[in-house]
Image: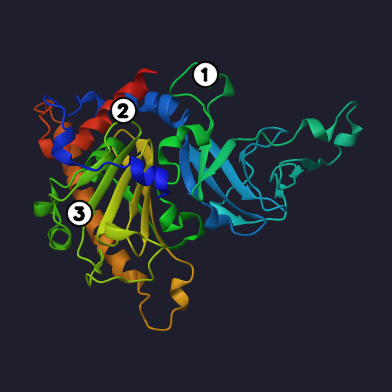
């Protein structure tokens, strides 16, 4: 982080920010189809949502698609190397344009009547439309989606611009929304990192349970024995304990890493300072990003709610692009990937057990412990956002 952000960071033990009397959410927030639809409308269709990283579309013509709320979105790098977002909808008769989840194109062409769009969204081909009086291709560019980058990660926002000054949960420029994180993660070189692996998980649990689970290690001794050997479960200290960005660090042994071997598995990501060499930072970024920063790699979860009882999670492991070229055999990404795949599946299992229990008529909101101050804070932010 820069000097300003570093000076502003004050880490406090988890229990020090606990709000007495905090309880888990009522049952309807985990099982109600009505609330799920409201979440899609009020949260995922109105806030900045993570869809990927710029390294996924490194070259002109690279694209991927993402389903955001009820909309399919195309994210593409154009011929001038700008990253753009468009609704995946032809301006002719509304046909879905890109059917694959990713690919390489010179232009975007409709599979129905072959209307063709440049990578910057301009309509450049419309067979026989020159026979239509008054038709002007300039009036039928692809509908743009608000898109912006933060530390190399691509975010989109479907909210109408008129919400900028009137609705807290509505559109505001990404720079303004992410202002509390400005410069905070500069030492990890996030924009230049490359994903070594992506695993997609289908979890039969409500998406909020994923965030709540990620935000505490109260469960670690019983659920994650391998993790608990490498990082003390009670070592958490947080510098962000209210609002849409929550988290802090946990300690690891100096020169160690969260991997199957317990050792670092790649070059350091950047010029980490002081004790950051023996810390792992965990931050939740509302509403769909989990950011885990290790000295030698970064793990990112994208959280995509599919139904009240089903969440799709995309997990990427990012490494320094020069790490693979080191000749001393220090690059072993599978050491970290295998460790966290095991740990992730342990988490998803207990989240599914939670979903099953919460669906019971016997469930009533229970008290959070003082070690669960961050899940309680996440719940408060969620409820505030749902009221907007």
- Which residue is under mark 3? 346
Q: Are marks 2 and 3 in contact (CB under 8 Å)?
A: no
Q: In this view, does 269 lie above or below 181?
A: below
Asked whether 293 or 98 is in front, the reply is 293
- Which residue is under mark 2? 381
Q: In this view, does 197 lie above or below 369?
A: below
Q: How far apart are marks 1 and 3 (CA)?
A: 42 Å
**Residue at the spot x=35%, y=74% of the render?**
332
Q: In this view, does 370 lie to the left or right of 283?
A: left
For the image shown, how many numbered marks are present on the structure? 3
Q: Residues within 10 Å of mark 2 (few under 14, many from 20)?
A: some
| Position in image of residue 7 (x %, y %) | 34, 43
**Residue at the spot x=68%, y=37% of the render?**
90
Q: In this view of the protein, can residue 69 be seen by the observer?
A: no
Q: In this view of the protein, can residue 236 be seen by the observer?
A: yes
**Residue at the spot x=38%, y=23% of the render?**
38
N-terminal label among 1 and 3: 1
**The furthest residue to the top:** 166
Classify mark 1: helix, strand or loop. Answer: loop
Q: In this view, does 110 lie to the left or right of 29?
A: right
């Amino acid at each position: 982080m820069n000097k300003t952000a570093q000076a502003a960071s004050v880490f406090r033990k988890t229990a020090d920010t606990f709000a007495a009397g905090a309880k888990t959410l009522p049952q309807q927030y985990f099982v109600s189809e009505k609330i799920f639809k409201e979440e899609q409308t009020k949260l995922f269709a109105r806030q900045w949502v993570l869809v990927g990283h710029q390294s996924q579309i490194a070259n002109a013509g690279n694209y991927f698609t993402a389903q955001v709320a009820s909309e399919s979105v195309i994210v593409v790098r154009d011929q001038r190397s700008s990253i753009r977002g468009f609704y995946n909808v032809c301006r002719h008769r509304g046909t879905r344009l890109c059917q694959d989840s990713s690919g390489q194109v010179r232009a975007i062409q409709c599979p129905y009547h072959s209307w063709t769009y440049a990578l910057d969204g301009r309509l450049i081909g419309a067979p026989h439309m020159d026979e239509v009086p008054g038709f002007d291709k300039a009036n039928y560019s692809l509908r743009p989606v608000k898109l912006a980058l933060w530390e190399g990660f691509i975010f989109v926002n479907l909210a109408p611009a008129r919400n900028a000054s009137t609705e807290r949960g509505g559109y505001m420029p990404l720079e303004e929304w992410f202002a509390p994180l400005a410069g905070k993660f500069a030492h990890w070189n996030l924009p230049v990192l490359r994903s070594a692996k992506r695993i997609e998980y289908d979890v039969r649990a409500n998406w909020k349970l994923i965030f709540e689970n990620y935000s505490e290690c109260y469960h670690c001794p019983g659920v994650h024995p391998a993790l608990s050997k490498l990082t003390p479960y009670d070592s958490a200290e947080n510098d962000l304990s209210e609002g849409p960005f929550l988290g802090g660090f946990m300690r690891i042994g100096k020169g160690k890493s969260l991997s199957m071997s317990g050792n670092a598995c790649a070059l350091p990501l950047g010029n980490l300072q002081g004790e950051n060499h023996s810390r792992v930072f965990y931050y939740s970024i509302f509403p769909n990003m989990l950011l885990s920063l290790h000295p030698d790699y970064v793990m990112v979860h994208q959280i995509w709610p599919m139904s009240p009882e089903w969440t799709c999670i995309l997990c990427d492991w990012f490494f320094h692009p020069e790490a693979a070229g080191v000749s001393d055999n220090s690059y072993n990404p599978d050491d970290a990937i295998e460790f966290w795949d095991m740990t992730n599946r342990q988490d998803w299992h207990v989240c599914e057990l939670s979903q099953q229990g919460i669906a019971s008529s016997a469930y009533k909101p229970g008290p959070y412990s003082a070690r669960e101050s961050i899940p309680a804070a996440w719940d408060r932010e969620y409820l505030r956002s749902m009221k907007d």
